Amino acid sequence: MGFRSALSKPFAKYIVNDQKKWSLDAVNTQHKILKSLVSKAKHTQFGKDHHFADIETYEDFKSAVPVADYEGLKDYVEKIKQGDSDILWPGKPEYFAKTSGTTSGTKYIPITKDSIPNHINSARNALLTYVHNSGQSQFLDKSLIFLSGSPIMTKTAGIHTGRLSGIVNHHVPGYLRSNQMPSYETNCIEDWETKLDAIVEETLTKDMSLISGIPPWVQMYFDRITAKTGKAIKDVFPDFSLFVYGGVNFEPYRGKLFESIGKTIDSVETYPASEGFIAYQDTLDQKGLLLLLNSGIFFEFIPADQYFDDNPPRLSIGEVELGVNYALIINSNAGLWGYSIGDTIEFVSKDPYRILVTGRIKHFISAFGEHVIGQEVEKAMNHALAQHPEAEIVEFTVAPQVTPESGLPRHQWFIEFDQPPADFNSFKSTLDKKLTELNSYYEDLIVGSILEELEIVPLQKNAFINYMKSQGKLGGQNKVPRLSNDRKIADELMNFRY
């Protein structure tokens, strides 16, 4: 046993014991976080504008601070970009995490000296929690790979600016740097396919034990290795024992990834975002991710079906219910206030508070009032794959077809199969039937002959890779939305159909 694995076990025990204390005292923990955040920010421009000095209770806070997306905070961010201090948080941010928006264009998310530990320590604690729960720590002594964006920074008003994964790369603990892959030089390559080839060359001779990244991009890495060696991943990396992932639901990718590996291995799910590290998997056998209530973020929750109301309810952690779809709102020591992160979550436990990520508040299909969400299409797909085990998919997305050339309007499922189902029509019907079970509005539209059964549009090999490449979004942290309420992505994907 090496020094990393030996030292990790007592540290992991300490982390898990501390985690149990705050996670089982959630309401009080969040109350303290809110009080601390408001107190520290009361002399900032935002704090003065919103009368932080007068806030005593959560009700006061809700009255003073509106819910907003990036557009609502953009004027404050622009002041920081012009060189001003004490705008959203005392002083200036250490970094801007640069991420793409929709209506906002490029977003500059502040990361402060106080918020950096949220990103770094949370990733560390996810691994240490796994070490404690599994008893496995030897993987820390071997080579670890983190498939991420480039660590190259630019400067905005003197503030280092780059992708979150690149920023985090600068803060990898020293005890992991000696066995971290890929090399800094390779990680700086901007073109994803060139970078991937370089990563393959660097890692083929290494004793890889942990691989981390967004599943579709990890799958590309595996495919390149298998194409080059003719071997399953387990035969190239016999000590590969842990897969760490986040950013998308793993289930649609699980079958093909494990087939590529050649065996089933342990996995740890994380929920990182530019705005904050939200949650991670804290058990080996229970559903959901532990919401990080003691890491500089005060969370609020709006029932997703009321999100677009004029005055939707805002709930704190003690007011949430199991099984309800909530829009996630954060207030943080990065200087984000009433910030709608855009994600929707559902609580599956309150003892402690564990969540599932269900989709995006703006990523749904409701062209006919059905309000189908990401969680529902993923459940339908997972069910269809279970019923047709010979079928394997690479990726999929769903969009409405409002004006078909013939027949009734319908949902179109754009699917890239690695292995198509033996009975295509049966697979389609299984998908559609499951979706009607999951969404009563969709069922009513089918029964009422407003919509007809969904249509599957099978796509060419590498269709999604080629689509992402055409958009300049291949690799890194980019991912295709699971569903859209318009035809923007769908019309592009029609160019890649069989």
Image (cartoon, helix red, strand yellow):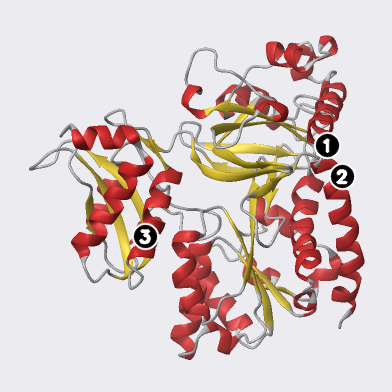
What amino acid is found at the position of numbered circle 3 in the picture? Phe
- Disc sitting over residue 323 in the figure: none
Q: Is residue 495 left or right of residue 254?
A: left
The quadrant of the image that shows the N terminus is bottom right
| Residue 205 position by quadrant | bottom right
Between 491 and 160, the one lying in front of the other is 491
The quadrant of the image that shows the C terminus is bottom left
Query: Which residue position is annotated with label 2?
Result: 21
Instruction: Tell me if label 3 and label 2 are in contact, CB under 8 Å.
Output: no
Q: Is residue 334 above or below residue 456?
A: above
Residue 96 can be seen, yes or no: yes
Residue lying furthest left: 406
- Disc sitting over residue 464 in the figure: 3
Eye-nearest disc, 1 or 3: 1
- Disc sitting over residue 25 in the figure: 1
What amino acid is found at the position of numbered circle 1 in the picture? Asp
Q: Earlier in the sequence, mark 1 or mark 3?
A: 1
What amino acid is found at the position of numbered circle 2 in the picture? Lys
